Image (cartoon, helix red, strand yellow):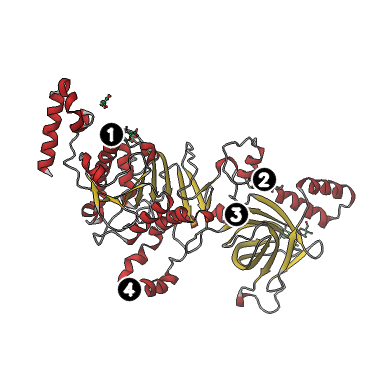
């Protein structure tokens, strides 16, 4: 290495010194003299270019400064180029996700260059030391990227994918390159020592033309969270709230041990952290099951179903096909997922008003909901409604792992929450209608009880069946005015007021409705809203 760099330096000086008469030697050195003066000798990271047939083998290394390695390794000049950057390594070996991601990238982009950045030596230290090393590795990667650019590889085709500490390596690299790389994807960027670090040291939106981030393991206080909690990209997606992931909880540990064995305890600990990679792989290979995420002010608002809008770029695709929207402020986005691939679920907001003559407030109520659609049905989806109070509107999020087509009918069953209420429980609410918004279809539909004008939802009683109503917003308004004029019974009046209340959207959506609908660049869902 030392000898080689000495040679390169020597050649560099030679070329510079002899520039005016060097045209005859251009074939030999074949490029810009300034390139030769860059010192590559301090680069310790290795750049393994992978082959789709042997995705887990290091067969050829691109060596910055050594032009021959480009042709030797079959680097495809002008092709999409991915750099995969791993994180902290306890074992000092590549983890199994590396080849899975390599394989998925080749599956999606068969002619791409897929390069694995090997910084295992510096990653296999105590965490704080490895975290500190991200600066050195970032500098290595930046030099490598500059070199690729000098070779004629367009930076618009360069995409860095960094996991955990690797996300910050990508960030540091992106800040040091001569020109911006097209994209950095941060896969659960590491939290400890980075949560409050200045933007130069960690991944930030300045580091590439577009930066997208998945946050999958951000549980606990900021210094203890494995994944960084703050948004650090243009689009920051927090699947399942970003805290921890389905299938990774303590209850699943026994199952995971059975699958991976007790020796792979670290796999279990990393389950949520690593889920970011598998969500990205899913987006590469399961294009028919594209997951969508929705912008929302908080996880709680999302869990109430209040944020399923796609207007004005409020929703986006998770993963590879993300729409490269760069808003001034980082947009926090949310979605729910399944516990395995394909991770996609379908999101619904269920909103209804609970009438009763009896004052009551019940917390944490278990419901079972069955959905019947144009193409399929999904039975008995369990959902816990945080609070049900007399004469109030409730809104909650419901997800289905099945695509049922357009929703036509729904069964709502209020389960008994075991012993707390005895056999005599007569808790019940009257429901007149239900509003259901679908995130994936961007439809807003009204449902009414199948039998009669009112449905009685009885705790521990039978399911109430609701069917799609052809009623439109306009005709409801007319009906309301009509009723106010002609029949003003107190109960009816109350109901009508409640109906008016329910027509009101949460604040953000109301704003949206007032906004012009000239959304030429809005998300590519069918945004026809059946109001
Ligand atoms: C060499 O690089 C310099 C600046 O980096 C540039 O201005 C010049 O055009 C390049 N020359 C060639 C032959 O590519
Ligand atoms: C790569 O392609 C660009 C343009 O397509 C060209 O200018 C450059 O010389 C090529 N580099 C190599 C190493 O083939
Ligand atoms: C590097 O990061 C700093 C701080 O975020 C920013 O001001 C600067 O423009 C960045 N440089 C490049 C080349 O991106
Ligand atoms: C129910 O509670 C509200 C507010 O606490 C009160 O104003 C109302 O009179 C109560 N109604 C009945 C029927 O107890
Ligand atoms: C709930 O509202 C209805 C209609 O407005 C009214 O008749 C009923 O008394 C209210 N219930 C309570 C407990 O206040
Ligand atoms: C969007 O939905 C409308 C009404 O449901 C339908 O007529 C139209 O073909 C749909 N467009 C696309 C692109 O799916």
- Assign a secondary structure to mark 1: helix
Q: Position of residue 296 (x, y in %)?
A: 54, 48
Which of discs 2 and 1 lies nearer the camera? The answer is 1
Sequence-wise first label, 1 or 4: 1
Q: Earlier in the sequence, mark 2 or mark 4?
A: 4
The label on residue 141 is none
Q: In which quarter of the image is residue 377?
A: bottom right
In the rendering, which numbered label is found on residue 150? 1
The residue beneath circle 3 is: 305
Callout 1 environment at 10 Å: few (<14), some (14 to 19), or many (20+)?
Answer: some
Marks 3, 2: nearer the viewer:
2
Relative side of 310 to 140, left or right: right
Dots 2 and 1: beta carbons under 8 Å? no
- If you read the primary sequence from the N terminus, does the residue marked by circle 4 or circle 3 appear first? 4
- Which of the image's four quarters has the N terminus? top left
Mark seen at residue 262: 4
SS for tag 4? helix
**Pointer 2 residue:** 528
Q: Distance between the residues labelled 4 and 3?
A: 39 Å
Is the CB of mark 2 within 8 Å of ligand 6?
yes
- Residue 401 percent location from the top left of the image: 56, 62
Q: What element carries label 2?
A: loop
Between the residue at mark 2 and the residue at mark 1, the CA separation in whole angstroms equals: 47 Å
């Amino acid at each position: 290495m030392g000898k080689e760099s000495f040679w390169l330096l020597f050649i560099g000086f030679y070329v510079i010194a002899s520039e005016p008469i060097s045209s005859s030697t251009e074939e030999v050195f074949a490029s810009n003299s300034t390139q030769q003066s860059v010192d590559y000798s301090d680069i310790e990271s290795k750049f393994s270019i992978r082959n789709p047939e042997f995705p887990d083998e290091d067969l050829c290394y691109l060596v910055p400064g050594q032009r021959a390695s480009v042709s030797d390794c079959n680097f495809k000049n002008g092709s999409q180029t991915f750099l995969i950057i791993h994180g902290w390594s306890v074992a000092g070996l590549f983890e199994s996700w590396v080849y899975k991601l390599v394989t998925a990238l080749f599956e999606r982009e068969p002619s791409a260059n897929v390069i694995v950045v090997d910084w295992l030596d510096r990653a296999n230290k105590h965490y704080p030391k490895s975290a500190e090393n991200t600066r050195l590795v970032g500098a290595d990667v930046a030099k490598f990227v500059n070199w690729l650019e000098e070779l004629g590889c367009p930076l618009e085709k360069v995409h860095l994918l960094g996991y955990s500490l690797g996300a910050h390596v990508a960030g540091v690299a992106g800040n040091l390159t001569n020109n911006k790389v097209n994209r950095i994807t941060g896969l659960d960027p590491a939290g400890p020592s980075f949560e409050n670090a200045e933007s130069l040291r960690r991944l930030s939106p300045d580091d590439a033309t577009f930066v997208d981030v998945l946050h999958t393991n951000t549980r606990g206080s900021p210094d203890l969270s494995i994944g960084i909690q703050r948004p650090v990209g243009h689009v920051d997606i927090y699947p399942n709230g970003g805290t921890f992931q389905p299938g990774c909880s303590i209850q699943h540990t026994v199952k995971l041990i059975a699958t991976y064995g007790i020796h792979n305890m670290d796999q279990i600990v990393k389950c949520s952290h690593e889920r970011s990679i598998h969500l990205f792989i899913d987006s590469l290979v399961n294009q028919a099951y594209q997951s969508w995420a929705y912008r929302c002010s908080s996880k709680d608002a999302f869990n109430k179903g209040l944020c399923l809008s796609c207007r004005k770029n409020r929703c986006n695709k998770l993963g590879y096909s993300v729409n490269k929207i760069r808003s001034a402020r980082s947009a926090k986005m949310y979605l729910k997922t399944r516990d395995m691939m394909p991770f996609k679920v379908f999101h619904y907001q269920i909103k209804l008003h609970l009438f009763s003559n009896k004052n009551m407030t019940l917390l944490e109520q278990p419901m079972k909901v069955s959905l019947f659609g144009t193409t399929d049905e999904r039975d008995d989806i369990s959902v816990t409604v945080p609070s049900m109070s007399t004469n109030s509107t409730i809104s909650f999020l419901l997800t289905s792992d099945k695509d049922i087509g357009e929703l036509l009918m729904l069964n709502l069953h209020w389960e008994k929450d075991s012993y707390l209420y005895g056999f005599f429980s007569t808790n019940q609410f009257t429901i007149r209608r239900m509003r259901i918004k679908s995130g994936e279809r961007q439809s807003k539909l009204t449902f009414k009880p199948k039998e009669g004008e009112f449905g009685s939802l009885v705790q521990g009683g039978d399911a109430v069946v609701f069917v799609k109503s052809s009623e439109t917003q306009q005709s409801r308004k007319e009906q309301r005015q009509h009723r106010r004029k002609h029949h003003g019974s107190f109960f009816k009046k109350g109901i009508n007021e409640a109906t008016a209340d329910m027509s009101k959207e949460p604040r953000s959506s109301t704003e949206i409705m007032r906004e012009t609908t000239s959304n030429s660049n809005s998300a590519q869902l069918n945004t026809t809203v059946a109001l």
